[in-house]
């Protein structure tokens, strides 16, 4: 028991697995399963200590509250290896309640960080359109793309 809410630990482990996949592909660095869990739980404990009791409250932004059930949130990211220029993208789509809809990733070959970010968004939009979703809010950490 790591003293964490399962949803918090699950999200952190999934993120760390994604980060480690990129470390392995681009830098040939590998972590053990126990290292992934330990680092994820450490991040989780620090996060919980920061937000305190507010974590267990229903977390939603005013944006999510004011949307109907037809809207989905697409979170994307791209990564490019400095040495080879090889890139990969990935993303996850969730409904306004945070429920998982779909996740995806793709190896792109050589491209720029900007192109990797744009490919991630395009892939996510096309997947969601194919699944019948038409109202998509794109969440990216790249100011150039946004």
Image: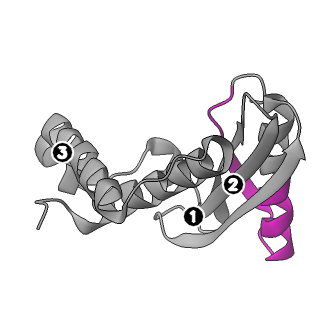
The front one of 35 and 14 is 35
Q: Residue placed at 11% from the left, 47% from the top?
A: 53
Check disc 1 and report the residue beneath it: 94
Q: Which mark is residue 33?
A: none
Check disc 2 and report the residue beneath it: 90
**Does residue 31 show up magenta in the picture?**
no
Among numbered discs 3 and 1, the one appearing first in the sequence: 3
Q: Is residue 41 left or right of residue 77?
A: left
The front one of 49 and 60 is 49
Check disc 3 and report the residue beneath it: 48
Snapshot quadrant of residue 62: top left
Single out the residue that lies furthest toward the bottom.
131
Task: Measure the C-alpha gap from mark 2 to mark 3.
Answer: 27 Å
Task: Measure the C-alpha gap from mark 3 to mark 1.
Answer: 22 Å
Snapshot quadrant of residue 50: top left
| Residues shaded magenta | 122-142
């Amino acid at each position: 028991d790591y003293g964490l809410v399962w949803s918090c630990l699950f999200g952190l482990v999934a993120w760390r697995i994604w980060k480690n996949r990129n470390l392995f592909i681009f830098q040939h660095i590998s972590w053990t399963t126990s290292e992934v869990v330990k680092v994820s739980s450490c991040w989780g404990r620090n996060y919980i200590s920061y937000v305190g009791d507010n974590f267990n409250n229903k977390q939603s932004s005013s944006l999510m509250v004011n949307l109907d059930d037809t809207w989905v949130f697409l979170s994307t990211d791209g990564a490019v290896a400095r040495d080879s220029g090889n890139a990969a993208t990935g993303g996850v789509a969730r409904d306004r309640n945070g429920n998982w809809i779909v996740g995806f990733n793709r190896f792109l070959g050589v491209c720029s960080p900007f192109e990797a970010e744009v490919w991630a968004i395009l892939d996510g939009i096309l997947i969601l359109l194919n699944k019948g979703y038409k109202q998509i809010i794109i969440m990216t950490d790249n100011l150039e793309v946004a």
